[in-house]
Image: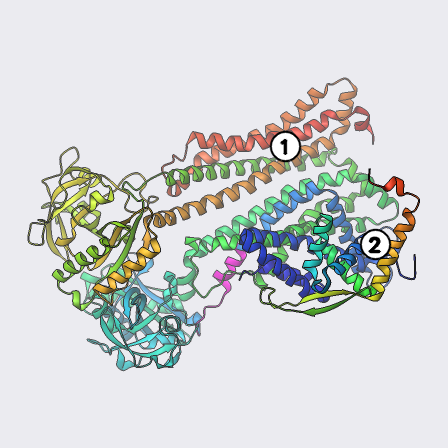
Amino acid sequence: MNRPPPYAAALLAALLPAGLRDAVIGDLAEEYEGRAAARGRRRAALWYWRQTAALGGRLVQDRMRRAVRPARRTPGLQPGPGGDGLLRTTLGDVRFGLRHLRRNPGFTATAALVIALGIGANTAILALAHAAFLEPLPYPRAARLGLLSMEFGGLNQGGFSVSYLDMEDVIEGSTAFDEVALFLDWQSVNLAAGGEPQRVPVNFVTPNYFELLGFRAALGRTFQPGDDRAGGAAPVVVLSHGLWQRAFGAADAVLGRTVLLNGLPYTIVGVLAPGAHDLSNRFGHETDVYLPLMAAPALTGLDITERRAARFLYALGRLRDGVTHTMADGQLATIGARLAQAHPASNEGWSFLLRPLREVYFEGSRSLVLLLLGGSLLMLALVCTSLTSLTLIQLSGRTPELSIRLALGAGRGRVARLLVTEAVCLAALGGVCGIAVASWAMGFAGTLDMLTLPGFSRLQVNGTVLLATLALVLAVGISLGLPPALRIFRGGLLDIREAGTRHTDARGRRRRAALVAGEVALACMLLVCAGLLVASFDRLRGTGLGFDTERLLTVRLDLRNDRFANPEVVRQTARRLVDEAAAIPGIRHAFLWSPSRLGGGNWVFFLTRRGEYDLDPLNRVEAARHHIEPQTLGRLGLTLKAGRDFTRTDTAEAPRVAIVSESLARHFWPGEPAVGRTLETRVRSERVLLDIVGVAADARHRSRLEDPFGAQRDIYIPFHQAPERFLSIVVRFEPDASVESLVSTLRRRVLAVDPTLPVYDVQTMAQQMRREEGRARLSTVLMAGYAGLALALAVLGVYGVLAHLVRQERRETGIKLALGASGGTILRGVFVRGFTLVGIGVAAGLAGALAGSRLLDSLLFGVDPHDPRVFAAALAAIVLPAVIACLLPALRAARASPLEALRP
Amino acid sequence: MGRHSYLGEFELLVMLSVLHAGDEAYGVTIRQEIEERIGRPVSRGALYLTLERLVDKGYLRARMADATRIRGGRPRKYYRVQRAGLAAIRDARATIAQMARGLESMLRKA
């Protein structure tokens, strides 16, 4: 079932009288459902918002009519008698203000739209800021919790993990903590529990971990000290509430059951209560399975307790009462120094890093949120300044109306208040639309990679955010209404009429002109940036990976399991799995290619020419390794530029061979053939020599965004000479095959080979490429939004200043016309002055863009940050509307009749 | 004009469509009746406020029923024409007929 937009519905509920609330909201929900089914949710939501706006307007009007009705008999704007005079006159002002706004639909719509964009952006970012700065962490005494990691020579602010042996010394030597828990939460394992096996994120923890985070067991127990013995943990497991519901149907009888994790048996001793958000949230996933820390070596192959340099763990500490973070930092520094002295081989240059938990979660988004907040507030300030010049023009247009009011006896203060109320109405109108903009923008922000928020924090417009938005709306309203109101208040009518002809106003005019030129410059810069991103996005989409990515599906399998301890078994199993996959109808080819793009470039060799490995570490070159089979390259569509493909004779017993990418070959042997040469590397500290038998064309195996122009250093080795236990199977399917049914068949075939092996990370190459494009699309859309807003502001600003000027100078214009000046001369005069302003702004903006667009370089793909075509397009985008903005007031000045202009 | 206060044009349209919709007369159907018969969009705000006014005047009676899941658990508000409402419709028709008397040739379709 589809739900109507909740904010719109809440707004309606607030506006509707009790007698109609249920009936109207229900009716709309009914129609919304029909529309959503027929035309899609997005259009239905748009429709709902329109209805809300129309209905809301009508209801507010109706309510005000009722409230004001008794006051109608008092003429003009006199405050009515009685205690509720103030309220009544305010309502009267509001009614009048709305009417005035409706009479100027062009101005109202433009202003409301610009305010809506400004307020909307701010509301969305305020919601983000609330999540990042104010929302409490869901842990007891969270302010005293800190995450311990290590840094090397002050590098890597995110922190490396810590080693078990180092932490033993910390726990012994430090008095700062009353509890320290160790955990390893960045792995996942295969879970088989009777049904279909699945891949689950796992956290290896010491027993006190649960107590520190306040996690309770809903069923059974958490770990006891006896579960976590060095040299062999008890085979027990605690499930997350989510996994218990998903995989075990929330059955009570789950306690005592045995499940297989990577093929090893573990007994379920507990299920956590709901709402336990694990620290793995900082990586963006919830843990499903908790195991004793000492189970990690058996399950992951990581030797956590043996070496000081085995830094695989994190530590969670709770500061003792009365101990500050600074005091703890001091202690840790001392311990770190002592360890470096005692164990220079493993600890030289390493120091401890203690970060408060909140910082751990939000440090990535914090500076970005502040930046966005600053940017959007600045934008809102610009919105206000641009609109103020428009309201001032409106004011001079209203001289007759306001004179009558003042003549009939309305006080200056009274009229000033009317003007402020009007402006607040306008701001409120924009604000309501702004909240709609915000709810859309937040859906968008949710997909932002850079803003990964932990699972417990919700991006929403709550009371606090709404209150802040309300304050912003008021501020906008007052800043728009106050300048005209002050004019009236200070000088009365005379000032309105004479405004601009006096000397003091010249300075204000110059200041406004400078502001407008600045706005034009800003718009120009943002347009260039948006243009570059659009060009880059276009380029990215048109760029292939260097091999045939059509109908290519990749899946992963994890064979870390005692049954696959023997490499020969891994080879045979891999062969069987590939054969099974190839036999599925609808699959053209199936082949091994580990890790494929799923590896994210994390599988590497450090390589040198033979005999140079130990000469200088800086000579070693990092290259991504690919474990493939004979024919894999051909089936991928990767051409061999020299030498031969792997063959069945490249077995484990034969000399180790490799195929290198052109870029890698060029790096080691520029201008010379690489085939026949030998590379050297280390595998688990052992020297390995690789004879190069072929050179393959370069391909983009990692993000197209990150290495746009080169450094495609890849090395291919035969799987059978290096049987990794993490497998990727790649299949090319037929054009008419359904991917879902292929995948479910594939899962079944894999289970037939081994019933404990889940197939995971199932992705087509097209999906992976689209995800890569998603970020680029996002930054493009955001930048285009900013640029559009800036352009609108700049054009409004130019128009505002010029229209103001024309109105102020209409007397001079009249005299000139009366003395025989042609309309053309007048037009040219106004236009040139306006366009000078634009010209200055554009020149400054282009210069700024030329200097600053280098900053965008990291976001650009295959586009020169000084691309003249983009600059030309940006120029056209700002000059065309600016010409119109200059032309309109100029035409008005030229068309004026001398008499009209000379009238007082 | 009779004992009743005069029904405005839109009020008359609303009263007639409540009659047309019969037992199924609630916001959605009433609006559909008008839109389908006269082929002109009806503002929801005006419709609901008019319905409430007609209830206040005693021409319609309202009853809440049928809260469904699609409606988010909110009941429909069904309207029914009252005796006074029927009389007001008759009056309004009679008033128009009286005013139109003698103008038949002019008002007849060409």
- Residue at 84%, 50% in the rendered image: A411
Q: Tag 1, which secondary structure?
A: helix
Left or right, A570 with respect to A174, comes to left
Q: Is residue A602 positioned above or below A260 on the image? A: above
Q: Is residue B42 visible?
A: no
Q: Is residue A216 left or right of residue A830?
A: left
Quarter location, residue A495: top right
Q: CA distance from mark 2 to mark 1?
A: 46 Å
Q: Which residues are magenta?
A: A125-140
Q: Nearer the viewer, residue A655 or A480?
A: A655
Q: For label 1, count other residues whose C-alpha is less than 10 Å away and answer few (under 14), some (14-19) or many (20+).
A: many
Residue under numbered circle 2 = B8
Q: Position of residue A899 (x, y in %)?
A: 82, 25
* Residue A130 located within the stretch drawn in magenta: yes
Identify which residue is drawn at 38% across, 47% down. A770
Q: Between residues A260 and A626, which one lies in front from this camera angle?
A: A260
Name above or below for residue A876 compared with residue A102: above
**Up/down of A408 relative to A810, above or below:** below
- Residue bearing the label numbered 1: A885
Q: Main secondary structure of the magenta part?
A: helix
